[in-house]
Image (spheres, helix red, strand yellow):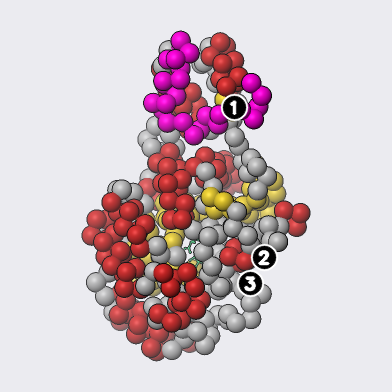
Amino acid sequence: MDDSEKIDIRVLTLSQLRKIFENKGLFSYRADQVYNWIWNKGVHSFDLMTNISKESRSLLNLNFEINRIKFDITQKSSDGTIKNTVRLNDNHIVESVLIQTKNRRTASVSSEVGCSLNCDFCATSKIKNIRNLKKDEIFDQVFLMNKQSLNYYKKPLTNIVFMGMGEPLMNYNNVVSAIDKITHPSFLGFSPSRITISTSGIPKLIKKLADDGVKTELAVSLHSTRKKIREKIMPFTKKFPLETLKESLVYWQNKNRKILTLEYIVWNLINDLKDDVNSLLEFCKGLNVKVNLIEYNSIDNDSFQQAKNSVIELYKKELSKSNITVTIRKSRGKDIDAACGQLANKSNKFFNLTE
Ligand code: SAH
């Protein structure tokens, strides 16, 4: 069999793998061992599976492969943030960021090569959207950044956020399958409450998360609750009205009883009026939310300028008056274009995906 015909073993479920082993006349429990090597120990070579017989290993080598991602370039910011340029098996490039703050080591992972949405203020939306990441490519980013965290910071990851390139809900199945492997007690055993899916807000899929019992945290990139403004800065939202979004969030929260995070950037002349604040307060009614005011990272688009501090203070004051917790997210890794919204494969011009 030539290499191109080999099956990537990680597309198989455990029961499919057991069946294959049985059909080849091998013990099916071997499949469980292989599965453990792959999803718990993260090995990329059958030859490293030392408790598997030589005969089984050569059968595996003959029929299967284990695709892998590689960290091609690793850049370190002056604040300790690490940006990885990730080469996928088919040579496409995404980026993953490892951020250390006081008590946390957070991996920000990508879910798409490019992004299927079109937020005007985000650098990722300016590059071509190529494809969804597969579940193993998402899993591997976490696995490798956990190693990296142990290496650089001497401690494992504490948190995972889907805030890299792409819209995680537009790659629903692979993101949820990767989360399943990352949280499964037999594999990485990471607590779902330390994982945050950050979405621009796809109502149907937010409801699906609730229905499917996905127990992660949820953050919604809101940025404006005034229809016209939101549609201007995030054009895809024309298809997803704010009322439908709100309804899906209430639905999610009824099933999850967790605090929802609303991500919000305040810009000059875009959402810096008292009306904008009042509209946000109205949107928050009936939801248990925390508002995360995000520092804007400039992406060479003059129409977006971070609002003055006095406006941000106004948001803070009014939200706090309504008993809504407000946090301010300072950017990390700005000097290496690793901050939110800056991921656009700038680190390697030869693999710039812009056409
Ligand atoms: N598509 C997902 C996740 C990727 S973006 C989402 O929209 O949530 C992660 C976060 O960075 C989102 O809150 C997004 O709105 C924010 N972001 C995008 N561009 C930004 C920029 N230039 N400066 C600061 N934050 C930005």
Which residue does the numbered mark 2 point to in the structure image?
335
Q: Are marks 3 and 2 in contact (CB under 8 Å)?
A: no
Whether residue 264 sits left or right of residue 68 in the image: it is: left
Q: Is mark 3 within 8 Å of ligand 1?
A: yes
- The CA distance from mark 1 to mark 3 is 42 Å
- The CA distance from mark 3 to mark 2 is 12 Å
Task: Determine which quarter of the picture holds residue 181.
Answer: top left
Identified at 54% across, 53% down, the residue is 112
Q: Is residue 17 magenta?
A: yes
Where is 323 relative to 256, above or below?
below
Task: Determine which quarter of the picture holds residue 259.
Answer: bottom left
Which residue does the numbered mark 1 point to in the structure image?
6
Residue 213 visible in the shown view: yes
- The CA distance from mark 2 to mark 1 is 42 Å
Which residue does the numbered mark 3 point to in the structure image?
299
- In magenta, the rendered stretch is 1-26
SS state under label 1: loop
The amino acid marked with disc number 2 is Asp
Whether residue 351 sits left or right of residue 60 in the image: it is: right
Identified at 46% across, 56% down, the residue is 170
Where is 179 relative to 103, above or below?
above
Give 134 or 261, whichever is nearer the viewer.
134
Percent across and percent down for residue 224 are 43, 77
The amino acid marked with disc number 1 is Lys
SS state under label 2: helix
Q: Is mark 1 within 8 Å of ligand 1?
A: no
Percent across and percent down for residue 156 are 50, 44
> In the rendered structure, which disc, 2 or 1, sits on the residue that comes first in sequence?
1
SS state under label 3: loop
The amino acid marked with disc number 3 is Ile
